Image (cartoon, rainbow, N blue to C red):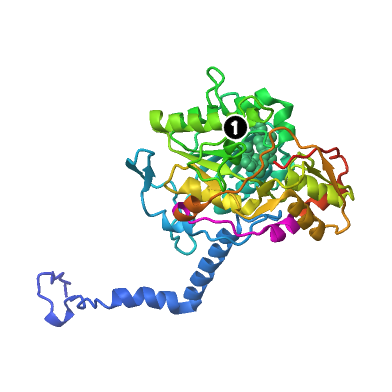
Amino acid sequence: MGSELIFRGHETQPVADAYSPKPPKPWLSVIRPIRYMLREQRLVFVFVGIAMATLVFTLLPSSNVPIYNIPISNSYLTSESTQPHRIIYQNGHVARFPSFNSGGKIPLGLKRKGLRIVVTGGAGFVGSHLVDRLMGRGDSVIVVDNFFTGRKENVMHHFGNPRFELIRHDVVEPLLLEVDQIYHLACPASPVHYKHNPVKTIISFTPIQFRTLNMLGLAKRVGARFLLTSTSEVYGDPLQHPQVETYWGNVNPIGVRSCYDEGKRTAETLTMDYHRGAGVEVRIARIFNTYGPRMCIDDGRVVSNFVAQALRKEPLTVYGDGKQTRSFQFVSDLVEGLMRLMEGEHVGPFNLGNPGEFTMLELAQVVQETIDPNAKIEFRPNTEDDPHKRKPDISKAKELLGWEPKVPLRKGLPMMVTDFSQRIFGDHKERGSSTSSA
Ligand SMILES: NC(=O)c1ccc[n+]([C@@H]2O[C@H](COP(=O)([O-])OP(=O)(O)OC[C@H]3O[C@@H](n4cnc5c(N)ncnc54)[C@H](O)[C@@H]3O)[C@@H](O)[C@H]2O)c1
């Protein structure tokens, strides 16, 4: 029999064999990923991963160096950040800017975007504490300092952190940096230092031909916000007590302190002129006597001198009759005030100080109670132009910045004593002294 090839392709297949896709089950697309996640405890690993990432990002910016922060609210980081910034000009005009502060309510595990910030004088006493807070917040910080009174030791715990840079530079010379904010602190701040080089003191803050407040020029060029650390010394020997920001002061323009007092007054003028004339966003803080760890030892400021003298078993030198008054704020309170001012919407000027008022004799008594009850007091003739009274009225800062100091003298002083005794007894080089009630 011959074989025959028979083509059957054209024959229709029985209907039962035809491919018919199953009707789609919409719930499967939801169930499948859920099942996948539940199998082999995958979900648990995801949660563990999120928790670990959160922990790492939360702990990363902290440092081992003592950061003298008293618990403070950081509400200013959250409340304003979702709002555009409003700048209230002196003439009442209100301008809105996009918020600088990229803080706000941060979802778990995510960090706020840091700002780029210059702190001139950041290796000094106040500056280094400010740098600690800014670094802790996650910002990138550039310290510009000529080390006239500042010390590398104050900031060296940030060395190696990629968000930190230190530039040895004198602010009387121009400098170009791309930044969002400028805290301008660089200035010899204690009588011993500013009297040492009065001309340099005044030009750190004022114009000499084209060096016009280099930092304000920088703020203008790069569109940064500029904060000036002015001083209660702008009130001179005040005829109004306590001092309100609207008081214009009583300064001797030709006295030994005027390089500092008039330097800061001119700096305020310039700051406002850049604001009004060039639209630079500015902030002005008038700082009252501040104390705390990392203060220069023997710099002629009354708290540091009393503490150093008591620790060395030397008599506490009181100038004049000791009845002149000052108000002393702990450094963490000041730093909190400066940051609120920078992040807030008001130009200022704002008094930042502790309204607790002490005579020099009362201060000496607190130092005796804290360090050595047997410490002697020695009276010396008063220094020239030493103001008789100083006490800030801080109603404006309370109302507009929601700020007031939290650390009383008797609580802050022991923290300073610990730091001073480590530095004095570990290093006996810093000796020699002269005091005024600055
Ligand atoms: N501490 C207070 O009680 C107080 C009171 C009122 C105002 N202030 C102001 O606060 C700011 C900081 O004061 P502080 O107590 O930390 O003083 P500080 O002397 O410890 O710090 C000043 C810093 O500025 C640096 N500096 C000085 N001149 C400079 C220059 N030309 N270029 C670059 N860096 C320079 C110094 O090296 C130092 O690190 C100052 O502007 C001061 O006038 C302080």
Which of 337 and 369 lies nearest the eye of the viewer?
369
Label 1 residue SS = loop
Count of marks, rendered view = 1
Residue 165 falls left or right of residue 28: right
Q: Nearer the viewer, residue 341 or 174?
A: 341
Residue 345 belongs to magenta span: no
Q: Residues within 10 Å of mark 1 (few under 14, many from 20)?
A: many
Residue 257 place in picture, x, y as percent: 67, 31
Drawn side of residue 70 relative to residue 342, left or right: right
Residue 399 visible to an observer of this rendering? yes
Residue 183 shows up from this direction: no
Q: Position of residue 112 (x, y in %)?
A: 47, 54
Locate residue 72, reporting x and y percent.
57, 60
Identify the residue position indicated by label 1 in the image.
251
Quick one: 102 or 435, which is closer to the camera?
Answer: 435
Judged from the image, the quadrant occupied by ligand 1 is top right
Q: Is residue 1 left or right of residue 305?
A: left
Q: Which residues are magenta?
A: 400-416
Say which quarter of the image contains residue 71.
Answer: bottom right
The image position of residue 338, as x and y in percent, is: 54, 47
Residue nearest the viewer, comparing 312 with 179: 312
Q: Is residue 243 above or below residue 383?
A: below
Q: Quadrant of the N terminus?
A: bottom left
Residue 151 vertical placement versus 69 (above, below): above
Q: What quarter of the picture does the C terminus occupy? A: top right
